[in-house]
Image (cartoon, helix red, strand yellow):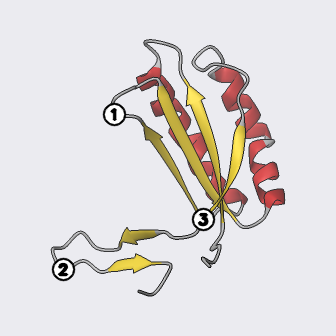
Amino acid sequence: MSEVSGKAVEIIWSLTPFRSDEFVDQWAPYAALAINFGAKGYLLVRQADDELVVKQYAFFDKKADWDRYWNSEQLQEGRAKLLGHYVVPLLYTWQEVHAHGHVTDSSAEAAVAASADV
């Protein structure tokens, strides 16, 4: 049985046409604010084959920290500022993280950090 190594919150932003570049540029600092509220990391990605779909992930251990982030004055202002750039309602879902990894160095001999031993 696999072990849960944390929680990730996923938000799927469905963008309105001709505003995806502006949205990504302006929302990136708001996504980064998750770190200030206890997130272990965050990710903001736009689909390569459909630029109107942006996904945001934030990695929190506690739902209370997520709630403080998502309901913070900064995020409320950011969502209001960009209203019209995305489709409402805006929903988020909690995901269980079972494995994760990343390259820790850009060299050819980069070590890979992983959450599970093989």
Q: Which residue is mark 1?
A: 48
Q: Is residue 106 left or right of residue 56?
A: left
Residue 42 percent coordinates (x, y): 55, 55
Q: Which residue is mark 3?
A: 97
Labelled pair 1, 2 in contact (Cβ < 8 Å): no
Residue 19 percent coordinates (x, y): 47, 17
Residue 3 percent coordinates (x, y): 63, 78
Q: Quadrant of the N terminus?
A: bottom right
Labelled pair 1, 3 in contact (Cβ < 8 Å): no
Quote the CA–CA distance across marks 1 and 3. Answer: 24 Å
Q: On screen, 87 above or below 73?
A: above
Q: Which residue is mark 2?
A: 109
Q: Is residue 41 left or right of residue 46?
A: right
Q: Residue furthest front?
A: 1
**Residue drawn where x is 67% and y is 31% of the image:** 78
Q: Is residue 56 left or right of residue 48?
A: right
Q: Earlier in the sequence, mark 3 or mark 2?
A: 3
**Disc 3, SS:** loop
The residue type indicated by label 2 comes to Glu
Q: On screen, 63 above or below 18?
A: below
**Disc 2, SS:** loop
The residue type indicated by label 1 comes to Ala
The residue type indicated by label 3 comes to Val
